[in-house]
Image (cartoon, rainbow, N blue to C red):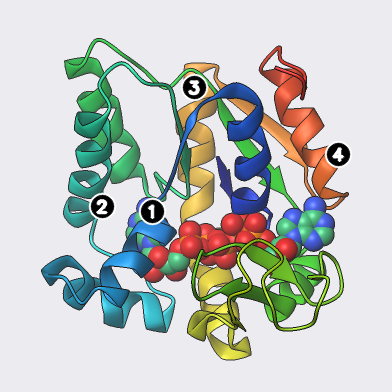
Amino acid sequence: MMGAPGAGKGTAAEGVCKATGCRHVSTGDLLRQAIKLDTPLGRKADGYVRRGELVPDEVMIGLVTEQFEAAPGALFLLDGFPRTLVQAKLLDEALKARGSRVSRVFLLETPRDVLVQRLGGRRLCRKCGASYHVTNIPPRRPGICDKCGGELYQRPDDEEKTILNRLEIFERQNADLVAHYRGQGVLHALDSSTSREDTEAKILGAMGRTGAG
Ligand code: AP5
């Protein structure tokens, strides 16, 4: 699942994985968890994530292949990975070595003003990581997670200056990735500026699945 920061990758991935049984691997979530737990990986990644820069490719491919090793034979939905052409090529090699491949790539497209509005209003649960938006997808009680009652907070990299840096980095890397996956005939671009339900339905439709199973 590719797309700019705020395109709705994480939000759509949650529903798609629920409907299909795919395992959701969000590299952003894995990095934030490592930072929270203050692991060696977390200490290495912290500065990059805080500034909205990309964590080095060799760190990222290791993080993702660890997930493959933890669940051999599973179907994975990768969210936010690969993000550079080098990562895409390393992923191709890692999958080939396992007798597998990237079967589909969903590119979520949303206008810049919508991205900025979404990121500025995003709130996450400190306890369970559930994601909300103060106006688009609000929790029932402001500041409180519907799922676990945890406190909602704003990601440090959702501050305006860092958002613009992240969008710029995405725009620089995206053309190469699009060309790579278009060349493989697996790219499926879709408009994700509509509702969460609509975006999920488009992805499930392209996977030949319905929300029911
Ligand atoms: P990561 O966590 O992956 O951040 P990102 O790609 O910038 O994406 P976001 O999580 O910001 O956006 P999203 O598209 O998932 O949107 P969401 O669904 O939350 O990465 C963070 C950092 O980690 C990177 O900057 C980098 O430092 C590092 N990193 C991660 N992967 C890496 C890699 N492969 N290589 C190197 N470094 C890496 O939605 C956003 C908001 O909009 C939410 O509030 C949501 O409620 C709302 N919303 C979502 N969909 C809709 C909708 N359809 N309608 C209305 N509102 C919606």
Instruction: Quote the CA–CA distance across marks 1 and 2.
Output: 8 Å
Mark toward the viewer: 4 or 2: 4
Of the two numbered discs 4 and 2 on the same chain, state the one appearing first in sequence.
Answer: 2
- Quarter holding the N terminus is top right
- Element at badge 1? helix
- Which residue corresponds to mark 4? 198
Per the rendering, the mark at residue 183 is 3
Of the two numbered discs 1 and 4 on the same chain, state the one appearing first in sequence.
Answer: 1
Image quarter for ligand 1: bottom right
- Which residue corresponds to mark 1? 27
Q: Are marks 1 and 2 in contact (CB under 8 Å)?
A: yes
How crowded pointer 4 is (Cα within 10 Å; few <14, some 14-19, many 20+) is rated as some
Instruction: Quote the CA–CA distance across marks 2 and 3.
Output: 23 Å
- Element at badge 2? helix
- Which residue corresponds to mark 2? 60
Of the two numbered discs 2 and 3 on the same chain, state the one appearing first in sequence.
Answer: 2
Residue type at mark 3 is Gly
Residue type at mark 4 is Asp
